[in-house]
Image (tube, rainbow, N blue to C red):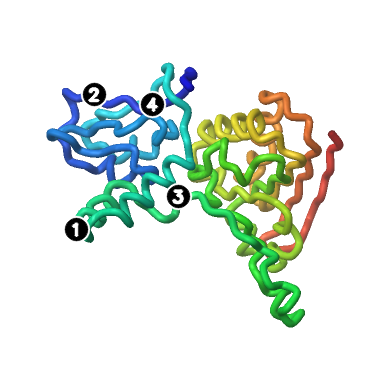
Amino acid sequence: MEKVRKIIEIDEERCDGCGQCVISCAEGALAVIDGKARLISEVYCDGLGACLGECPQGALKVIDRPADEFDPEAVEAFLATKSQGEPAAAAAVAASRGGCPSARLRAFDVNCDAANQPQAQVSERSALSHWPVQIRLIPPNAPFLKHRDILVAADCVPVAHAGFHADFLPGKAVLIGCPKFDNIQEYLEKFTEIFRQAEVRGVTVLSMEVPCCSGLPMMVRKAMTAAGCGAPLEEVVISSRGEILERRREAA
C-alpha cells in the first residue's frame, strides 16, 4: 500500500555507477544495473539515507513521495534468498550489495532453557531480545517494537553500568545510539514514527551524566509529544563510573 514517505531518489546524470551506495545499503535496496545505481524495490528502502554519504557524486537524496511502505520482513526474505539461493560467487556479490547481517531483523528467546541452568549462569545470560539494536538500523515497524516497553540507551551506558542487562534490559526492546555523533534530526523522526506505529507500553531513557547526552531524553520526550504517545516515561542518568545518579518517572 502506498503512502507519502521518505525514500531514496537517484540522479542518473550524476551517478557514475561506482557502487558505493550499494555496499552501504544494509537492506539491499540498491543495485548497479546498466552502469547506474537503481532502486530494486520501494519496499526494501527504509528512507533513512544511510547510503547518502557514500556517494562521491552527490547523486542521491531522500525525498518525500508516494511509495510502497518499507517492509522489513520482505527485506529479510530478500537477503536470505540472495545469500542462500545463489551460487557462491553470486552470493558474494549480493553480500557486497547490502546483505549486511548487522541489519537483519531477529528476535531471540531470552528465556530458553533458563530453568535448567545454574543460577550463576542464568544471571550472566544476555537479556537481549532482538537484533539490530542501533537506532539507525531499526525500522519503526519492526515487529519486536510492537506493544513493548522501549529502552532508549546512550551507547556508553552498557559499558559504564555493570548491571545493564540485569537492571534495565529484561522485557524491553532496546535502541542504542549516540546523540553527539549521530544525526539528531534523523533520531527525532525515527522515534516519532516508532511512537506513532508501535503503541509502546512504556519508555525508559538511559543517558550519561556528560552534557552531550542530555539531549537524548529531551529528544524522546519531543518525539512522544509529536506522536501523541501517552506512555509512561522514565529517565535515568548514569555516572561515568556506572552509578545511577538520578531517576525520574513521569506517569502516563
Q: CA distance from mark 2 to mark 1?
A: 29 Å
Residue flagged by tag 1: what amino acid is it? Answer: Ala
Q: CA distance from mark 4 to mark 2?
A: 11 Å
Q: Residue 223 at what x, y percent from top left? A: 65, 30
Q: Which residue is mark 4?
A: 62
Q: Residue 17 at what x, y percent from top left? A: 16, 36
Label number found at residue 241 = none
Disc on the earlier residue, 3 or 4: 4
Seen from the viewer's position, the closer of residues 22 and 83 is 83
Q: Tag 4's secondary structure? A: strand
Answer with left or right where residue 108 lies relative to residue 202. Answer: left
Q: Which residue is mark 3?
A: 103
Between circles 1 and 4, the one closer to the viewer is: 1
Going 59% across and 43% down the picture, which residue do you hit? 143
Q: Tag 3's secondary structure? A: helix
Instruction: Count residues near mark 4 (Cα–Cα under 10 Å), then give few for <14, some for 14-19, many for 20+.
Output: some
Seen from the viewer's position, the closer of residues 39 and 53 is 39
Q: Tag 2's secondary structure? A: loop
Instruction: Count residues near mark 1 (Cα–Cα under 10 Å), then give few for <14, some for 14-19, many for 20+.
Output: few
Residue flagged by tag 4: what amino acid is it? Answer: Val
Q: Which residue is mark 2?
A: 11
Contact (Cβ within 8 Å) of mark 1 with mark 4 = no
Going 74% across and 65% down the picture, which residue do you hit? 166
Instruction: Count residues near mark 3 (Cα–Cα under 10 Å), then give few for <14, some for 14-19, many for 20+.
Output: many
Q: CA distance from mark 3 to mark 2?
A: 26 Å
